[in-house]
Image (cartoon, rainbow, N blue to C red):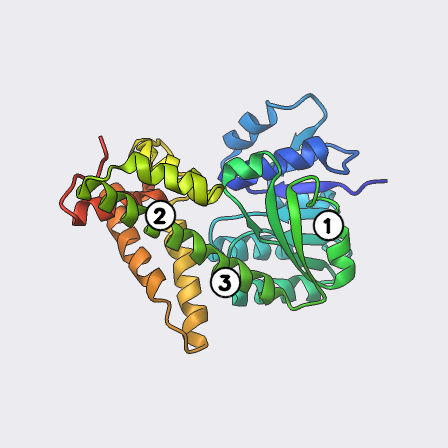
């Protein structure tokens, strides 16, 4: 019999991932759903047929019923608070916790130890890909932890939530988060490079359309997608950010921390993060990582918005 699954966290990425577990995962029971804002759980569950989901009123109530618990939360302190809540209330012996949040490697190690000390299994499983990619099950998953635990978790990734996996079974948990944080610097640096190139193209008289066609031809995939998103003006028109500036800067801080501990300086990321600080100042919490383009425009003598 398939295990009972609990999903904790219905943010931008979490909704698509959970959707794919419900629709394509090895589930024989309703998938248990918990989100801090209950209305989001209600609205999400309404998209599925009766019996496919079950909303739980608390993390503890959900964990008590579940065999496998997936979490994808925004920040380290939230992850640790949820873990503390679980461990204060529930016997977790034999349960498998699959942590998909982008957090500091040290946080992952601390949380994993807490669960291990109480007889639970734990897998670190951060993912790469934008929310739209998560919606269609095309993420890249990174799985680290004891090989047996990783094998239990894998049935929910490739072919369900992910198109591929980087299997780090039997490697320390922190390795998955190191890869995730270093990998996320590619995204910030990509948006920075696109922004500088597009602004220069506009101001030099070349025009942004030619540059966009170049990007589409030579760098299809994420580069082209971000170029489209930037030029559409979505970065200043979205009612809710796809990659919020606060989360982008949190990831940058973690990457800086990792680099500093190793004696490495990430100069490209420093430039991108400085522009993210300008995005935060201009747009507040609604700022998106693609707003780096607006920041580059502004410091180049153009309006932040590309109207």
Image spot of residue 109 (x, y percent): 59, 67
Q: Do the residues under discs 3 and 1 have CB atoms within 8 angstroms?
A: no
Q: Mark 2 packing: few (<14 Cα in 10 Å), some, or many (20+)?
A: many
**Circle on res. 245:** 2
Q: Nearer the viewer, residue 150 or 64?
A: 150
Image height check: is 260 above or below 242? below
Query: The residue tagged with tag 3: helix, strand or loop?
Result: loop
> Looking at the rendering, which quadrant does residue 252 occupy?
bottom left
Task: Name the quadrant of the N terminus.
Answer: top right
Return the disc, 3 or 2, that comes first in the chain's sequence: 3
Image spot of residue 176 (x, y percent): 59, 61
**Circle on res. 104:** 3
Res. 266 in view: yes
Query: The residue tagged with tag 1: helix, strand or loop?
Result: helix
Residue at 56% of width from left, 32% of height from top? 41
Would you say 108 lies left or right of 151 here?
left
**Circle on res. 154:** 1
Image spot of residue 72 (x, y percent): 56, 47
Mark 3 → mark 2, Cα distance in angstroms: 17 Å
Would you say 188 lies left or right of 69 here?
left
């Amino acid at each position: 019999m398939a295990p009972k699954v609990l999903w904790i966290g219905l943010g931008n990425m979490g909704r698509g991932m959970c959707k794919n577990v419900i629709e394509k995962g090895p589930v024989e029971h309703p998938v248990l759903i918990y989100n801090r804002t209950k209305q989001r759980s209600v609205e999400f569950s309404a998209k599925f047929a009766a019996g496919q989901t079950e909303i739980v009123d608390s993390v503890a109530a959900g964990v008590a019923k579940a065999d496998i618990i997936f979490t994808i939360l925004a920040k380290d302190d939230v992850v640790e608070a949820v873990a503390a809540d679980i461990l204060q209330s529930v016997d977790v012996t034999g349960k498998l916790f699959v942590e998909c949040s982008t957090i500091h490697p040290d946080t992952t190690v601390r949380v994993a130890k807490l669960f291990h000390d109480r007889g639970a299994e734990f897998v670190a499983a951060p993912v790469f890909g934008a929310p739209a990619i998560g919606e269609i099950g095309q993420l890249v998953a990174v799985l680290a932890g004891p090989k047996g635990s990783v094998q239990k978790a894998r049935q929910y990734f490739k072919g369900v939530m992910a198109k591929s996996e980087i299997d780090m079974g039997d490697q320390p948990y922190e390795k998955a988060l190191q890869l995730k944080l270093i990998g996320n610097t590619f995204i910030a640096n990509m948006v920075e490079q696109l922004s500088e190139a597009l602004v220069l193209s506009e101001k030099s008289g070349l025009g942004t359309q030619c540059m966009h066609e170049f990007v589409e031809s030579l760098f299809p995939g994420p580069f082209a997608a971000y170029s489209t998103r930037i030029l559409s003006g979505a970065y200043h028109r979205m009612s809710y950010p796809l990659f919020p500036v606060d989360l982008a800067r949190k990831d940058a801080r973690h990457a800086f921390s990792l680099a500093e501990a190793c004696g490495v300086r990430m100069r490209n990321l420093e430039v991108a993060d400085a522009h993210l600080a300008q995005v935060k100042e201009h747009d507040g919490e609604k700022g998106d990582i693609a707003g780096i383009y607006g920041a580059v425009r502004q410091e180049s003598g153009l309006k932040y918005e590309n109207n």
